Amino acid sequence: MKIVNKCVFLDRDGVLNNDRVDYVYKIDDLIVKNGVSEALKKLKAEGYLLIVITNQSGIDKGIFTELDVNKVHDEIQSRTGRCIDEFYISIFHRTITKSLATKPGSLLFEKAIAKYNIDIANSWMVGDRLRDLEPANKLGIKGILVDNEYHENYPEREAKNLLDAVDRYILN
Ligand SMILES: [Mg+2]
């Protein structure tokens, strides 16, 4: 029997940490949002894989490097109990390099689904932009819009933040 895994896909900026217009690539600028550590631990305890899919186009623009991003991800892990199974990064900026890896492209979701045998019917995507949710929806994964700072319209499911998304929808 093939083992399938349920998964919560996560956007990074605006979901796990406060977003910044000039990118989060320095540890000093990293502010993990309230309730994130608790939310990730709850999901882990219920057997969810936790996979981050993040656009980091500042790499393509030469503003920072993949090494900087990896350091930020290690810091997120150390502040939240090392619950996240993998970070998938698109390093491309749409005006420089066209790539299906960049959300709303779905390539990184498809890679994760193939690698981890993800059961899409029992999986979720939490993001703060429609471009996070569109590729997930296309693949049959339910979306939740959190922290709707950009005032986008996603009537299917909205929550205040990740912990609210977990309590209101995923583990409800
Ligand atoms: Mg975001």
Image (spheres, rainbow, N blue to C red):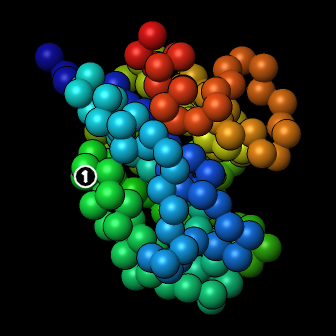
The extreme bottom residue here reads 62
Residue 27 can be seen in this image: yes
Q: Secondary structure at mark 1?
A: loop
Q: Is residue 92 left or right of residue 66?
A: right
Q: Is residue 58 left or right of residue 153?
A: left
Residue 54, given in percent of the width and then of the height, sits at 54, 57
The extreme top residue here reads 172
At 50% across and 68% down in the image, what residue appears? Answer: 30
At 84% across and 30% down in the image, what residue appears? Answer: 153
The extreme left residue here reads 1
Q: Is residue 89 left or right of residue 57?
A: left
**Which quarter of the rendered picture does the N terminus lie within?**
top left
Bin the neighbour count of mark 1 within 10 Å (Cα to Cα): few under 14, some 14-19, many 20 and up.
some
Residue 101 can be seen in this image: no
Q: Nearer the viewer, residue 15 or 3?
A: 15
Indicate whether 27 appears above or below 48: below
Query: Label 1 sits on what residue type?
Result: Arg
Q: How many marks?
A: 1
Residue 135, given in percent of the width and then of the height, sits at 63, 39
Q: Would you identify the image quadrant in which residue 144 lies? A: top right
Indicate whether 116 appears above or below 21: above
Residue bearing the label numbered 1? 82
The extreme front residue here reads 34
**Which quarter of the rendered picture does the C terminus lie within?**
top left
Find out if the beta carbon at label 1 lies less than 8 Å from the nearest ligand 1 atom. Answer: no
At 64% across and 73% down in the image, what residue appears? Answer: 23
At 64% across and 60% down in the image, what residue appears? Answer: 19
Residue 28, given in percent of the width and then of the height, sits at 49, 78
Residue 98, given in percent of the width and then of the height, sits at 70, 67
